[in-house]
Amino acid sequence: MQNKTLSYLLLLLTTCFFSSCFQIIEEINMTGNGSGTVDLTVNLSASKTKVASIMLLDSINGYKVPDKQTIQKEMDEVVAHLKNSRGISNVKKKVDFQNYIVSVSFAFENISNINNINQSVLKKLKINTTSNSSYLYNVAGGTFQRNYTHTKEAVTQYNKLKPEVKNIFKEATYTSIYRFDKPVITSANPLAKISKTRKAVLLNTGIPGLINGKTNISNKITLSK
């Protein structure tokens, strides 16, 4: 997956495997000195009726369905870990069981702090994977960069899923939104769109393309000086 903390949020809500549609949304707000905030969201609201029914079950198709208490507990553990991570502060979580939306937000001193917590969170949770996404922000040069590399492990894990679970990912989407306090001059990724205000860059794509390596979300954004 793209951002590894996002991957974990997705794992927390295994019920999304059985809904018809879900969204992963990553929002990064940058300031000129390289600090900023992150908001990571898993949104199942489009299938909330179906998810609500599934949440009443112990398991479905051989998959354990987490109850609300388990989800809250896991989210609290993530928050506690983030609060102890270097350069991370103001950690908050939201768990909306009305619409089935889960999010975690936090502030960072430097964009590199995000790279540092990705692997540490997964290690704590004993999830074996390789990092394939990192961020750079050059204050002097006014450039924001996301480096993304597809890994074969994503395909391997996907192929282990049951056919009915694989089908769920066909409608799943990933959205990244990067906001800046200066106008954007250029955005290198052709899939990304610059807002009318030229202070935000949005990229929306299907998750299947990320899994099979057909979509690359790497980008280099140059800001006005």
Image (cartoon, helix red, strand yellow):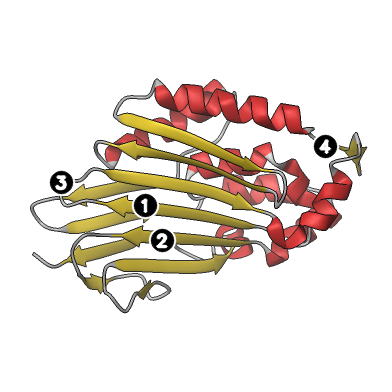
Mark 2 or mark 3: name the one nearer the start of the chain.
Answer: 3
Mark 4 or mark 3: name the one nearer the start of the chain.
Answer: 3
Mark 1 or mark 4: name the one nearer the start of the chain.
Answer: 1
- Name the residue carrying label 1: 28
Helix, strand or loop at mark 4? loop
Which quarter of the image is occupied by the C terminus?
A: bottom left
Q: Which mark is residue 65?
A: 4
Helix, strand or loop at mark 2? strand
How far is the residue under mark 4 from the one under mark 3?
Answer: 43 Å
Going by the numbered disc 2, the residue's amino acid type is: Ile
- Name the residue carrying label 2: 177
How far is the residue under mark 2 from the one under mark 3?
Answer: 19 Å
Examine the image and state in which quarter residue 202 appears. bottom left
Q: Are marks 2 and 1 in contact (CB under 8 Å)?
A: yes
- Name the residue carrying label 3: 33
Q: Residues within 10 Å of mark 4 (few under 14, many from 20)?
A: some
Going by the numbered disc 4, the residue's amino acid type is: Val
Q: Residues within 10 Å of mark 2 (few under 14, many from 20)?
A: some
